[in-house]
Image (cartoon, rainbow, N blue to C red):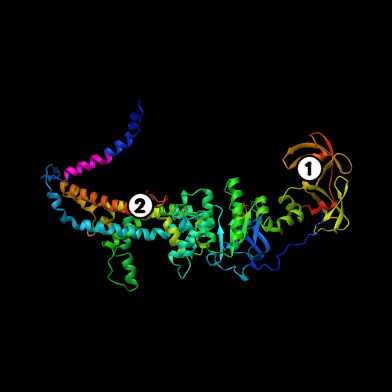
Amino acid sequence: MEIEPYTEVTLTADRKVVAELRGVSKSFGDVLAASDLNLSIGEGEFLSFLGPSGCGKTTALRMLAGFEVPSEGQVLLDGDVVNDLDAHDRPVNMVFQQYALFPHMTVAQNIGYGLRQIRPRIPKLQIAERVSRALEVVRLGGFEDRKIWEMSGGQQQRVALARAIINEPKLLLLDEPMAALDRKLRKEMQIELQDLQRQLGITFVLVTHDQEEALSMSDRICVMRDGRIVQIGSPQELYDRPNSRYVADFVGTSNFFNGKLQGSPEGMSTVLLDNGMQVQGMAGDGLVDHQDVCISVRPEQMKLGHQGDGVEVKVHNRIFLGEHTEYLVSHQTLGDFLVLAPRQADLTEGAFAVGDTAAVSWEATAALILDRN
Amino acid sequence: MTQRARNWLLLAPAGIWFLVMLIIPLTVVFIFSFGERAPSGGVVLALTVEQYANLPARWAAFKNTMTLAPIGTLSALLIAYPLAYFLAVKADPRWKTILLVLVIVPFWTSILIRSYAWIFLLGGRGIPALLEWVGIEGLRLINTPFAVLVGIIYGYLPLMVFPIFVSLDKLDKRLLEASSDLGAKPWKTFLQVTLPLSIPGIATGCMLVFILLMGEYLIPALLGGGKVFFVGNALVDLFLQSRNWAYGSAVAVTLVVVMLIIVTIYMRLISRLGANREDVSIM
Ligand SMILES: Nc1ncnc2c1ncn2[C@@H]1O[C@H](COP(=O)(O)OP(=O)(O)OP(=O)(O)O)[C@@H](O)[C@H]1O
Ligand SMILES: [Mg+2]
C-alpha cells in the first residue's frame, strides 16, 4: 500500500470560500470552550465537526450562527468579518438539536417564518408556494396545516430542515440533528441529508460525536479536542493519515504500541517499542528526534498467519462478522490487540479457534508513527 | 361497594364544598333578592321585583366597578408584564428567586396597613406637597379614582406577575434563538414568539385580578374616601349599615350575573385565540 506523506488538506482551488474562522477563541468565564480555531469552509462543501462531548463543537457552530461572539479572532462570511453581525442579519440558518419548532404555529407557519421576516414583504401566495415546495423537498408534501405536536420526531426534524433550507442560506448549520432519532431513522436521514445537500448545493456544517456519521456523510471532517482543532481532512485522509493517536483512535479503530523514535523522523523510521522490539513505520508530521511515540496499526492491516515471521500471539476471542472475522489476540509483552481477517483469508488459510497460537504481521507502511497524545 | 358508589363517595367532599360554599348561599341571596326590607332591618320574604327596579339608584357603584376593574386589570398587566419579563428572561438566575420573593414581600403585611401608607403618600402631606415644592400646586390625589387605581395596581400586581412569570420562565430560550436565526429582529421575536407563548399566563393573571377586583371594597373605601365606591362598598353599606338585605341581595345577584357574562365572553375569546394551540388553556 502506497501512502504519501501527510500534508494538511486545504481546499481545492476552484472552491470559493464561504466562511472562515481566523484564530477564533471563545471563553466562558474561565472555561476555554474554543481555542485558536482556523478553518475555511468551501462553497457547497459538507463539513463536520467531530469530537467527544464538551470539546467545543456547539460553541464553534454558534459562533458561525451569530449566537456567540468570539472572545478573540474573526469570523468571516463571504470574505467579510461578521463578528458584530447579529444572528438575524446573517445569511446562515441552523437546525437545532431539539428542533426548536414554534409550538404555536402550524407546520406551514413554521417553515414560512424566515420568509415572513423579509422586507419588502414577499406576497403571501408566493410564501405558501415556496413552503409547499420545501415540504416536498423533505418529503412531507400535504402536511402544511398539521400542528407541530402532531408530528413524529422524524417528521419534526424534516420540518426543522425545511424551515432552514427555504431561506437558501449561505451556510446550513446542523447541531447533532440526528441525536434524537432511533438508529434506523438516523441512517435514513443521513442518506436523505446527503442527497439534499447535493441537490441544493448548500454548504452544510454538521456537528456530531458519532464518527460513523461523520465518516459517511462529510467531504471533510474537523476533529476537535478540548476546544482545539486537531486535524482537518477528508474521511480517507483522517483514516489513513491521522496526525495523532487521538485522531487514529477517534476515527476508526486501531492498535497502539508505545515506543521511542530512533533517530530522526523522516519517512520510514525505526521505533524501539517499550518491550524491546524494533519496528519500522511511517513517521507522521511534527515529530522530533527520540520522541516518545506510539505505533498505530489498523486491525484490517494486520495479517494473521500460522507460522513464519511476525509476533507470536494466542487467540483470545473470535467474532464472526460475515465478511470479516474479528480476532482478539494477546501477545506476551505487547498485550491484547485486534486483528480483522477477511473471510477470504479464513477460507484459504483456515480460520483460527480460541486458544490457537498464531503469528501476526503487518507491512511497515501500514504502521504509523504518531504522537502519543 | 360498587364502582358507582365509590365514585360518588370520592366526589362527596367536592360536592359538599360546592353545596355549602356556593349553592346554598347563592340560593339564599337569590331568594332574598325578591323579598322586602323588614321594618327593623333584615328581610321579609316576598315575591316582588321592587328591589331590582331600584337598581339604578346604585348605578354609580356599578359604573365605578365596571370601569375601574378593567382599567385596573389592564394597568396591572402593563406594569406586570415587563416586570415578569425581566425576572424570567433577563435577570441573572442567581437573583431570580430573591427578586421573585421581593415581589410578594408586600403580601406579608395586611392590605389595610399598606393602604394607609398610600393614604399618607397620596394625601395632602405626601406627593402633592412634594409637587407643590417644585411648583405644581393644587393637585388633589387622595379620594379620587386615580388614588383607587393606584391602590388596585399596587395591591394586585403580584397576582398578575406570577402567572406571567411562570409562562415566560418555562419558555424555551432556543425558540428565541431560532426566531433570530430565521431573521427576526428582537422586537419581532417578542411579538411573534414570546408574546403569543405567554398568553396563557396573561389570561390567567387577568382573570384572577379581574374577578377579585369586581368584589373589591377595602381599597375604594380607604383611598376613595366614600367618593369612589364599588359595588362591594354598596353591599357593605346595604347589609351592615342600612340593613336592607333584600335590596343588598338584588345588588349582589346582579353583580354575580354581570361577572358571569363577562367571564363567559372572556373565556370564549381566549379559547378562540388559542383554538389551534395545545399549550393554551385557561387556568
Ligand atoms: N454558555 C456557556 N457558559 C459556560 N460554559 C459553557 C457555555 N457553553 C458551553 N460551555 C462550556 O464550553 C465547553 C464546550 O461546550 P460545547 O457545548 O461547545 O461542547 P460540545 O462539543 O458541543 O459538547 P456536546 O457534544 O456535549 O454537545 C464545555 O466545557 C461547556 O461546559
Ligand atoms: Mg453540543
- Chain containing mark 2: B
Kindly report the distance in space between the C-alpha atoms of the residues bearing marks 1 and 2: 70 Å
- Within the magenta stretch, is there residue A264? no
Q: Quadrant of ligand 2?
A: bottom right
**Residue A264 position in % (x across, y down):** 87, 58
Which residue range is magenta in the image?
Answer: B20-32
Q: Position of residue A322 (x, y in %)?
A: 72, 40
Location of residue B264 in the rendering, given as x and y in whole percent from the top left corner: 29, 51
Query: Disc 2 on helix, strand or loop?
Result: helix
Q: What main secondary structure does the magenta stretch of the protein show?
A: helix
Residue at numbered disc 1:
A344
What's the amino acid at mark 1? Gln
In percent of the image, x 22 and y 56: which residue is there? B62
Label 2 sits on what residue type?
Answer: Ser
**Residue denoted by label 2:** B271
Judged from this view, the residue extending furthest toward the left is B39
Q: Residue at x 33, y 31 (%)?
A: B9
